[in-house]
Image (cartoon, helix red, strand yellow):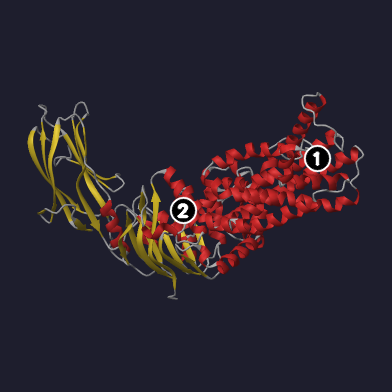
């Protein structure tokens, strides 16, 4: 089972920034298509145009899953639309063997006035399914979507969750593709349904070539056998090792410094300490399970002593993952005197899942609870491990005992 | 989902491989029958489920138009002159037939516009939109024809055996309307000016066709009426309905042949331009 099903060579597509120009170029392109000329003027950019994707090449075999990751506007969706045959490439070539299916626009063609059941048939027809095929599977679809008797109510009475569940069920139950395109569709419904979706997709993907676009690195790590990181239309890295690709993707994230607060305190410097050594690299890479410490220099202008400080670790989505209030041995807060200070601390073994992180430090006035200073985006670093796990904290556990009962 | 074979996308114009292009087009037209039927059922049932008057809407507008012209003529504001049929019947048949033509003309662009988000995200045989548009026009047209026949019989006008030829005229109205709509669709999808101009143009063309007015005998307007390709369509359809012998049969046949030819050409153009239009539609 190693036949190559998708082959993409030097694929490029340009878009236009100005709508007026874009429409006019559309007219020109129609004209040249009709007189049999090549699309895209052989790679010459017209005024206001830019490359939305540039020179992309890859292959996907049966049983493989290619993850496409990158920030918004990196060209992932454009690439997927070309693969799906919706828009023409300006350069390059796509060759695909077998039936193509896509889980992209769920519930396409749904009409809110019609009942769920009627819409299932319309949606299935849009996906190219015959009525007989749907007749056989309709109960399975209703079951999967957890719609119950609502299947005969108008879709406009559905909650948004029911809507996407039904849309997903139709596509996931009916299609049996050789090639599958997935675009962020697994983020539908609540957590229970997401797991169901993942399993359904897993069933389809086992025997097909898949291109999967997602911002969810856990899903990418779980599904993909290869990862392409795209940045501004180009391939940054094409790696058979998903965690390497994911690491590169995290590297693209910008942890910008943001300072707020009254100005009663000031963070002067933050250094990362690994194994008692100050790390000089910008954005160091830290293996999962290493002991991590910080050296923080700060100035507290306030006369009152006993400010409260906490060190926080934030992930790429700017979510606080770890909060470390500074206390004394007795566990009491408010330990910082005024003046210029140096704080040396260790947070112990780093158990964060792989990803990009940065430090946020807040110094709080003990009486008014005002932030004397709050600085985020300090000392960015990356944690690497061989896989991306689902949890934010990953702790490998050796049981005291494993017994066969 | 496409058939289990090799799909290749390149920047080359699809015209570089005309045989493949036509083969794929015919395959898609055949494949799209079920989808077209589903879309038709969807649109019609949604349309009629949401109204109180239901199917009456297929005839209310032409009926209102008829009443206006009957009033204008009988009050002397406009003097149409002597008609071979009673004027109310002349106007009523004219506006009904005209409404069928215009509905067919609007259908391709309307269907494509309404399906923009689907077009932008899903690869399906787009010809289905055109076919569904024709189905819908046929359905609404049949309601109009049924009412028309009932009204004619009621006032004692019997079409005779000619009625058997009327389906040809009915099909011609839809054919010609669809072809014109199809010609306008590619540009109409880019620039909404086209969609805005259609009602205006339709209004103007109606006055140049023997819908509410008689054929002028002489002068510039007579020439315009005679070269207007809608003239033979309306006249022939009306004649076959009301038991007269059509005068413009030659031109009627010519317009139909020309439309069939243009239909083939513009189906290909529709297919060629669709990916370019989808690109400019955004996501």
Q: Nearer the viewer, residue A257 or A55?
A: A55
Residue topped by disc 2: A185
SS for dot 2: helix
Chain under callout 2: A
Which of the 4 image quadrants contains residue A336? top left
Looking at the rendered structure, the secondary structure element under dot 1 is: helix
Q: Nearer the viewer, residue B85 or A104?
A: B85
Front-most of A349 and A76?
Answer: A76
Which image quadrant: the N terminus of chain A? bottom left
Chain designation of label 1: B
Q: Position of residue A163 (x, y in %)?
A: 55, 47
Q: Report x, y in % for residue B91.
A: 80, 36
At label 2, counting other C-alpha atoms closer than 10 Å, the crowd grade (few under 14, some 14-19, many 20 or more) is some
Indicate left or right for A258 with B78 as reference.
left
Residue at mark 1: B93
Relative vertical location of residue A265 with respect to residue A291 in this rendering, above or below: above
């Amino acid at each position: 089972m190693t036949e190559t099903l998708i082959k993409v060579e030097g694929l490029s597509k340009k878009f236009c920034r100005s709508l007026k120009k874009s429409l006019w170029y559309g007219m020109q392109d129609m004209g040249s298509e009709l007189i049999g000329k090549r699309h895209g003027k052989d790679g010459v950019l017209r005024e206001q145009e830019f490359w939305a994707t540039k020179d992309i090449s890859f292959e996907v075999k049966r049983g493989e899953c290619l993850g496409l990751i990158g920030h918004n506007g990196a060209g992932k969706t454009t690439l997927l639309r070309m693969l799906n045959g919706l828009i023409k490439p300006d350069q390059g070539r796509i060759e695909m063997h077998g039936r193509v299916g896509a889980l992209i626009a769920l519930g396409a063609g749904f009409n809110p006035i019609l009942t769920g059941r009627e819409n299932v048939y319309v949606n299935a027809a849009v996906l190219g399914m015959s009525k007989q095929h749907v007749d056989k599977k309709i109960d399975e679809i209703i079951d999967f979507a957890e719609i119950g008797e609502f299947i005969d109510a108008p879709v406009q009475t559905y909650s948004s969750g029911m809507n996407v569940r039904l849309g997903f069920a139709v596509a996931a139950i009916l299609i049996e593709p050789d090639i599958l395109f997935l675009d962020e569709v697994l983020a539908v419904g609540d957590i229970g349904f997401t797991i169901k979706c993942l399993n359904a997709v897993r069933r389809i993907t086992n025997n097909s070539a898949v291109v999967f676009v997602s911002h969810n690195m856990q899903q990418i790590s779980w599904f993909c056998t290869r990862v392409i990181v795209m940045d501004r239309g180009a391939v940054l890295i094409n790696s058979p090792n998903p965690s390497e690709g994911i690491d590169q993707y995290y590297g693209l994230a910008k942890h910008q410094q943001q300072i707020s607060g009254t100005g009663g305190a000031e963070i002067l410097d933050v250094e990362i300490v690994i194994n008692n050594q100050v790390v000089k690299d910008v954005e160091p890479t830290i293996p999962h399970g290493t002991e991590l410490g910080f050296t923080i220099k700060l100035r507290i202008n306030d006369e009152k002593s006993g400010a409260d400080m906490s060190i926080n670790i934030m992930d790429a989505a700017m979510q606080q993952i770890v909060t470390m209030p500074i206390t004394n041995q007795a566990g009491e807060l408010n330990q910082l005197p005024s003046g210029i200070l140096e704080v040396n601390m260790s947070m112990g073994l780093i158990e964060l899942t792989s990803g990009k992180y940065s430090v946020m430090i807040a110094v709080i006035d003990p009486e008014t609870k005002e932030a004397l200073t709050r600085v985020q985006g300090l000392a960015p670093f990356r944690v690497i491990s061989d896989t991306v796990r689902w949890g934010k904290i990953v702790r490998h556990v050796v049981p005291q005992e494993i017994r066969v009962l | 989902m496409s058939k289990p074979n090799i799909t290749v996308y390149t920047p080359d114009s699809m015209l570089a491989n005309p045989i493949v292009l036509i083969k794929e087009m015919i395959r898609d037209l055949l494949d799209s029958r079920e989808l077209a039927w589903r879309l038709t059922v969807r649109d019609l049932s949604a349309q009629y489920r949401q109204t109180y008057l239901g199917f009456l809407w297929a005839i209310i507008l032409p009926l209102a138009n008829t009443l206006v012209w009957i009033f204008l003529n009988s009050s002397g504001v406009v003097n149409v002159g002597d008609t071979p049929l009673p004027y109310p019947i002349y106007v009523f048949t004219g506006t009904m037939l005209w409404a069928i033509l215009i509905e067919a003309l609007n259908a391709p662009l309307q269907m494509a516009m309404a399906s923009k988000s689907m077009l932008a995200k899903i690869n399906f045989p787009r010809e289905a939109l055109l076919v569904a548009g024709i189905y819908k026009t046929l359905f609404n047209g049949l309601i109009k024809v049924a009412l028309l026949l009932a009204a004619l019989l009621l006032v004692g006008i019997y079409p005779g055996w000619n009625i058997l030829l009327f389906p040809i005229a009915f099909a011609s109205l839809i054919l010609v309307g669809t072809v014109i709509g199809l010609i306008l669709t590619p540009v109409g999808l880019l620039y909404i000016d086209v969609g805005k101009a259609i009602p205006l143009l339709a209004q103007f063309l109606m006055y140049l066709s023997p819908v509410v007015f008689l054929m002028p005998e002489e002068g510039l307007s007579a020439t315009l009426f005679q070269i207007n390709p809608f003239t033979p369509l309306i006249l022939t359809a009306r004649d076959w309905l009301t038991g007269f012998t059509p005068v413009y049969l030659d031109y009627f046949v010519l317009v139909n042949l020309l439309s069939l030819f243009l239909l083939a050409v513009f189906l290909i153009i529709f297919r060629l331009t669709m990916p370019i239009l989808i690109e400019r539609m955004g996501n």
